[in-house]
Amino acid sequence: MNFIEELRWKGMIHDMMPGTEDVLNKGMVSGYIGFDPTADSLHIGNLVQIVLLMNFQRCGHKPIALVGGATGMVGDPSGKSEERNLLNEEILNHNVACVKKQLEKFLDFDCGPNSAEMVNNYDWFKGMSFLDFIRDTGKHISVNYMMAKIL
């Protein structure tokens, strides 16, 4: 099954980078979609993304479900009038486990080379301190640029 043809048939493609279909037809490719673990259950708004990952896997590709455990601890910077609750590590770990249990009903996490994987961005952010961040990353962003983003 061709992933792009499947998406075209479903009316899910509006535009794509040139060469994308060629890359996908050459062999297995990894692709990810992010999920928010600020609740212990996924919701109907996640269904399209889950089905997309299912079809991606059925076409021989490797789906990766990225849960935002670190970003879930930060709160919601989307500009909404209310900030979402800041969750501690214990609650986020519980939510991540619940999300994986739900995803296992749709994705195959044990089928060989294209087994689905679930990764948590907390795993690579937990050891980073504020000083590490401003030393390694912050030096590439001017104060004027940062101020423009918050004003």
Image: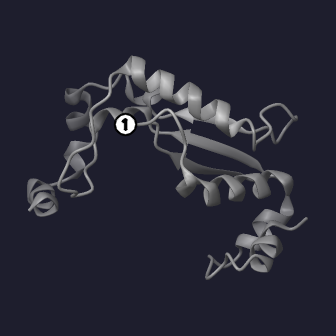
Q: In which image quadrant can residue 84 be found?
A: top left
- Image location (x, y in percent) of residue 44: 57, 54
Whether residue 60 is visible here, answered yes or no, is: no
Percent position (x, y) of residue 54?
76, 52
User: Looking at the picture, how far across and down is residue 111, in whole percent?
Assistant: 87, 35
Closest to the observer, 105 or 32 = 105
Specify the farthest residue to the right.
1
Q: Name the residue under label 1.
A: 72
Residue 125 sits above or below residue 89 on the image: below
Query: Residue 64's quadrant in the figure?
Result: top right
Q: Residue at x 38, y 20 (%)?
A: 89
Report whether residue 50 is seen.
Answer: yes
Q: In this view, does 82 lie above or below 23?
A: above
Q: Which residue is found at the position 75% from the left and 44% from the top?
A: 106
Direction from residue 42 to residue 10 in the image, left or right: right
Count of labels in the image: 1
In-front residue for pair 92/121:
92
The amino acid pointed to by label 1 is: Gly
- Could you tell me which quadrant the C terminus lies in? bottom left
From the viewer's perspective, is 97 left or right of 125? Answer: right
In the image, residue 144 lies at what x, y percent?
A: 8, 60
Please name the residue shown 75% across and 76% down the image: 10
